[in-house]
Amino acid sequence: MKNHRMIMLLIATPFLLIGCAHDTDRQKDKQKAAFKRSLEENTHQCRKSIETAELSNVKSKILWVSGLSEPTAAMQSDENFIQEKEKSEIEMLFKIIDFCQNMYRSTITLFINTEYGDQFKKHLYAKNSNLSDLNDAKIAYGTYNRQEAELGKQLIRDLQFLDERYRSQAMRQYTLEPPVDLQRSSNFLPPIFTQYLLFELIAGALLIL
């Protein structure tokens, strides 16, 4: 009887393993769909916050308020400094940046890990610093827009750097013990997951960035 049970277990094991693999794939698909929905909702809320704000004086002057992914030649060469009538709208932009960046950072921290979220925290600080320089008349609109375009590219480079690092760590798991970061990161998702995020950024879907 014991041998019979052992034989049945050996026969069933491959099917159990296949079932576990399918369950893992389904779980990853659900996570990916949830991540996509969260990003899309973040983007919708950000666009709505821009569209409903009273920004008539600066809308054509500021890259991400205009909805463009790259500054126009006119935006880059604008030598005008902030005017008094525009200051209240610039203050509104500080609030919009905080609102949107914090949403994106929370989503990315939840679905990937804290380190990716921290890149958005660093990016938020840089965007606020650039806007402060504009608000304090230290730089003109053209300089502001050129620096904003570079900040967006830098965020993508930072995320790609993390992606490559985690990709290398994931590959080493086949021959070495899992890295400490991966063991601690219960919500870690594979590097392929962040490719969706980078696509969104590059495609300009996340206008606030």
Image (spheres, rainbow, N blue to C red):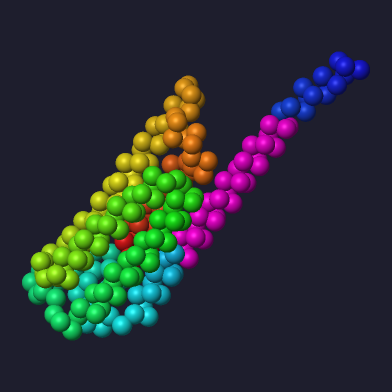
Q: Position of residue 95 (x, y in %)?
A: 32, 70
Specify the quadrant that holds the C terminus. bottom left
Q: Position of residue 81 (x, y in %)?
A: 10, 74
Residue at the image point whose x is 15% and y is 65% from the top = 133
Instruction: Name the one closer to the observer, 15 or 28.
Output: 28
Vertical relation: 166 (above or below) 37: above
Q: Position of residue 98 (x, y in %)?
A: 34, 65
Within the magenta stretch, is there residue 50? no
Vertical relation: 25 (above or below) 97: above
Q: Position of residue 143 (x, y in %)?
A: 13, 64
Residue at the image point whose x is 39% and y is 69% from the top = 46
Work out whether residue 206 can be spotted: no
> Which image quarter: residue 126?
bottom left
Pick out the residue farthest to the left: 79
Is 64 displayed left or right of 102 in the figure?
left
Is 193 displayed left or right of 131 in the figure?
right
Within the magenta stretch, is there residue 38? yes
Work out whether residue 31 can be spotted: yes
Magenta-tinted stretch: 15-41
Q: Which secondary structure dominates the residues rendered in magenta?
A: helix
Pick out the residue farthest to the right: 1
Residue at the image point whose x is 42% and y is 61% from the top = 103
Is 90 displayed left or right of 195 in the figure?
left
Instruction: Name the one closer to the observer, 95 or 7.
Output: 95
Residue at the image point whose x is 45% and y is 31% from the top = 180
